[in-house]
Amino acid sequence: MSTLRFYALRDAVNRQPIETHESTRRSDQFRKQVFDLDKMTRHLTQDAVQATENAIVKGKKIDRAIADQIAVAMKEWAIGLGATHYTHWFQPLTGSTAEKHDAFFDINSRGDSLERFEGGQLVQQEPDASSFPHGGIRNTFEARGYTAWDPSSPAFIYGTTLCIPTIFVSYTGEALDHKTPLLRALQAVDQAATDVARYFDKNVSKVNATLGWEQEYFLIDKALAASRPDIMMAGRTLLGHASAKGQQLDDHYFGSIPTRVLNYMKDLESECMLLGIPVKTRHNEVAPNQFELAPIFEEANLAVDHNSLIMDVMDKVADRHHFKVLFHEKPFKGINGSGKHNNWSLATDTGINLLSPGTTPMKNLQFLTFFVNTIMAVNRYEELIRASVASAGNDHRLGANEAPPAIISVFIGSQLTEVLNELEKVTEGKLSPKEKTDLKLNVVGKIPEILLDNTDRNRTSPFAFTGNKFELRAVGSSANCALPMTVLNAIVARQLIDFKKEVDQLIDQQGLKKDDAIFNVLREYITASKRIRFEGDGYGDPWREEAAKRKLSNHVSTPDALMASTSTAAIDLYEGLHILNQVELKARQEIQFEEYALRLQIEGRVLGDVARNHVIPTAVQYQNVLIENVEGLKSIFPDSYEEIGAQQIKLIRSISGHIAKIHSNIDEMVEERKQANGLDDGFSRATAYCRNVRPLLVDIRYHCDKLELLVDDEIWPLTKYRELLFTK
Ligand code: ADP
Ligand code: MG
């Protein structure tokens, strides 16, 4: 009997839900462990609070004396809540978060012990960062990295550690993390959107990008997960035959949440409240054991930090409940994968959502301006959006018969399509008073009513307008949202800057009135961006063919998709907005090629090991039983055993056939990996893994899965799909 699998199953089946103590009034708990402005006001002088506010809102530097004050107050507050250590908390290009804890405890020159934490330690640290990915930057410049405080994301206590959100850069200034370019892109979009918003309201002085992510994930019993080397090492199953029942009955989606899972969610949500992560919804997803969690949206930088933090919290809380969280985009073949929809909009400091239609025609012209410019930005830079969501895991979703497709398009619904069609007919140059009145009454003025009953939903679109925000659905569940958010905000910033230039030109040079000029430019954009708009079914060949005619990209694999991230257009965009320079872009791309190749290398090694050392020995063991059986039959029925044992003999043959194929495929895969590893540029290596190694993973799996169906269940060593997916 295969002991590990059955012990794991016994453990899983016998689990009792872990009790949780949930306080009913969440608002009492909210941000208890966050050093937010409210706590600053209580612990700091007015000057220090003002300086922090200026840093948050205007990006102003905080001087050293004030930083010392803030540090001391932060330390006292943290120690009061049981913190013993502090860390700079950052997001290196590994995709996870990094921290290095230092104790507050110190000894002064007289030998007395004390708790120390000063401005210097708050503002800057120098983690030994030599093992973080840098894509050649630090080798080239022989510089070390340092982390610097980001006052716009408040410090928080996690466990017994005070965590200070920081950026991570090299001494020569190159960004080595996800946060640095994100902050720069947010600053660019703030500036550009503020300038455009001021056409409509002079009181606007800041625009924040907002982000509400929806995190999908699977929960698997910890013991079952531990029984599968592929889940432990690669985060997904590399083999496993489909279970008889999967998601075909749709009986999991929005169904009642199992108690063990519900307790996990409650526990997780309590932690989130303390950490200031405003989680709001929880529900079952489509696939068995798949769930989703979504917060109330926040300013994008904070929302990105909160998503990174929550992924870590989810892992830790899961452990308490004997679960393992799977963030992989495709943990199970034949079962829905996981994504992370990024709901995005722009909000002014006067409290207006710029993608929400208003109550007057003028406010709706503002809405249309931001709406059309966003579509235009996506049209110009669709390949950059595609590149921003590319990863080995996400390749299993995008373009692999799962929503959304790898072709980036924008869905806006039939009613807004009509509005844009009307606007496209606007006269060139100055509009007549009658045309303007007509437009205001019948087109622009009607938008709020339209949206009220806008029930249009298109689940296959990668970028959909959903009433008062756009929803980027192509982001993978394991991704850091910073990258797609950097791209989206950067391209919209670029687009708004160009828009304003064109409108101002029409006003200054052709003497058009402001709204005439805006209508004129929007009309041009609506025509120019038509190819990116698609309302139909994103699955299947018809759209692929149509998209090719429209010259939209369709990169189904990560290496191809990533090429766009260093195109001339990308470099111009990033350098023009001072987000990243060419060296940094190349370094990042190199890191991504490398990560892609490494992930496939790990998958290849794990599958090779499991197939050769777990699957084949089991198959041989079972084959021997069959051989013994046939030999027994032969001794009793020497003349007719071939007929009586026909099925067994067939099985013996077929097992040998699969074993032979697995062996030869593994040999071939090892050879292909060697070849790939020998290539010295990142793109060629990643491409070799993609073209030559990945198909072999599929072949090896095919034969292993066939064997799973043939071999005695009692001795099969790997926990099966039905056990992983339906044990609650
Ligand atoms: P659904 O898209 O499933 O219908 P909702 O419309 O309630 O659900 O919103 C989904 C997500 O969109 C939530 O995480 C929410 O916080 C976020 N969201 C709502 N409004 C905005 C906005 N203005 N900016 C960014 N995210 C938003
Ligand atoms: Mg959604």
Image (cartoon, rainbow, N blue to C red):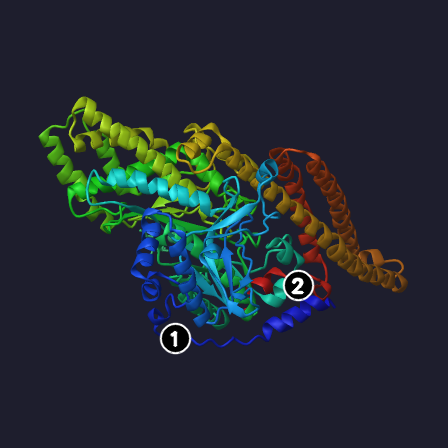
Tally of numbered tags:
2
Name the residue type under label 1. Answer: Ser
Name the residue type under label 2. Answer: Ser
Q: Which residue is mark 1?
A: 23
Please tell me how crowded label 2 is: few (under 14), some (14-19), or many (20+) other residues with Cα within 10 Å: many
- In percent of width and height, residue 280 lies at 37, 63
Q: Quadrant of the N terminus?
A: bottom right
Residue at the limit of the structure toward the top, as seen here: 509
For ligand 1, the image quadrant comes to bottom left
Q: Which residue is mark 2?
A: 227
Residue 294 vertical placement versus 450 (above, below): below
On screen, residue 645 versus residue 172, left or right, reads right
Residue at the limit of the structure toward the left, as seen here: 434
Pointer 1 or 2: first along the chain: 1
Separation of residues labelled 1 and 2 (CA atoms): 36 Å
Residue at the limit of the structure toward the front, as seen here: 110
Helix, strand or loop under label 2: loop
- Residue name at image x 33 percent, y 38 percent: 374
